[in-house]
Image (spheres, grey):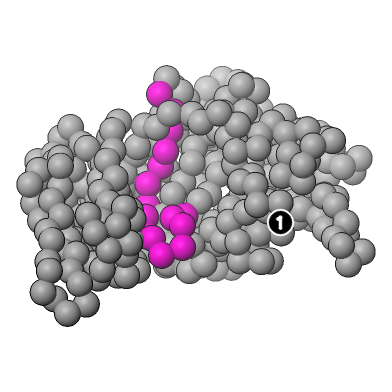
Amino acid sequence: MTMEQRAASGKKASPFTFQDTDVRPGTSQAFDVPISVMSSGSAVGMPVHVLHGRRPGPVLFVSAAIHGDEITGVEIVRRLMRKVSPASLAGTLICVPIVNVYGFIGHSRYLPDRRDLNRSFPGSPNGSLASQLANIFHTEIIQRADFGIDLHSAAVHRHNLPQIRVSAGAGRAAALAAAFGAPAIITSKLRDQSLRKVAADSGVEMLLYEAGEGLRFDELSIRVGVRGVMRVMAAMDMLAAKRLKTPLPAPARATQSSWLRAPRGGICVMKVRAGDTVHEGDTVALVTDPAGTDEMAVHSPVDGVIIGIATLPIVNQGDALMHIAEVKAFHTVGDRITENTEDLLAEIMPDEDELL
């Protein structure tokens, strides 16, 4: 602990003002940030939960369901809020369990205007529905934070290995990505009009967590996410639990990845799973006609690890079958992913009602 942190530890935080309301130190409060009015006349709001610590510290936001059908993050945020006590917290945790409320209700990735919210930032108060929601999130959440974690999953009928995405050159985020403890860390470019890009432009570094499948819960993905967010909070000195700072097996790291696509339509038989390592030339899938008379093998173009895979065996020509991350320390990556996963499953996590 630095001198500044020791000094801050003895101070009491000031109230945190959100939506013209003061949240007192050591308390939490739920808000419903107005978004719009539905065609039925019912008001729609974005749920926001502010957990304001008793001691001063950074402001961290954790968001989920920017894509409405990616519900893994919603459960991660729910469990996170049950585990973190404002009384023992330093700083402020802003939880947004459902950003795209419309998509979440309709089991859809998109908003009713068919726009992708994660391609609509920073938005505008007078633009499309997606643009207005992006503007609300930008002004109410991003610009009030010091750091952010956005929770995602794969699309429907795909499954992602738990992984952290971080942009190149983000020094603080790179260190916190390692603290998160996911099996893999992927360095990926910032996309224009994405949440990560507008946050970076606003001086707020971020981690993006990818895990599991759209419209499905996956216990491993959820547990990695809950533990990861809490480990990041511990690394930021927001939580004091020593067990959250215990070193974990080193993650697999990659800066490049490749998508494999179906060479023809038919039935796809996968030969690998998410988390498996592959060598260049390995047969990773077979695509055949329903009668099995015309079979085509799909080969890995690189040495790497499977970080995403299709779960629907019925494919059309050109459909994405799997996502392979190229890794540098290939000879150890399989062991690292296995160790990381086994460590998580064997770890005794805090009980559902045990507050930290």
Packing grade of label 1 (10 A; few <14, some 14-19, many >=20) is few
**In this rendering, position of residue 125 left or right of residue 52:** right
Residue 163 falls within the magenta-colored stretch: yes
x and y, in percent, of residue 160 in the image = 37, 55
Residue 322 falls within the magenta-colored stretch: no
**In this rendering, position of residue 245 left or right of residue 192:** left
x and y, in percent, of residue 49 in the image = 73, 52
| 124 over 162 or under it: above or below | above
Q: What residue type is labelled 1?
A: Pro
| Residue at image point 58% right, 56% down | 109
x and y, in percent, of residue 198 in the image = 62, 28
Q: Nearer the viewer, residue 223 or 167?
A: 167
Q: Where are the magenta residues, as a range?
A: 153-168
| Residue hosting label 1 | 112
x and y, in percent, of residue 229 in the image = 50, 47
| Residue at image point 88% right, 67% down | 40
Q: Which of 188 and 38 is in front in this view?
A: 38
Q: Quadrant of the C terminus?
A: bottom right
| 12 over 243 or under it: above or below | above
| Number of numbered discs visible in the structure rendering | 1
Q: What element carries label 1?
A: loop
Q: In which quarter of the image is residue 221?
A: bottom left
Q: In which quarter of the image is residue 295?
A: bottom left
Q: Could one spot residue 172 in this view of the protein?
A: yes
| Residue at image point 26% right, 68% down | 266
Q: Nearer the viewer, residue 343 or 20?
A: 20
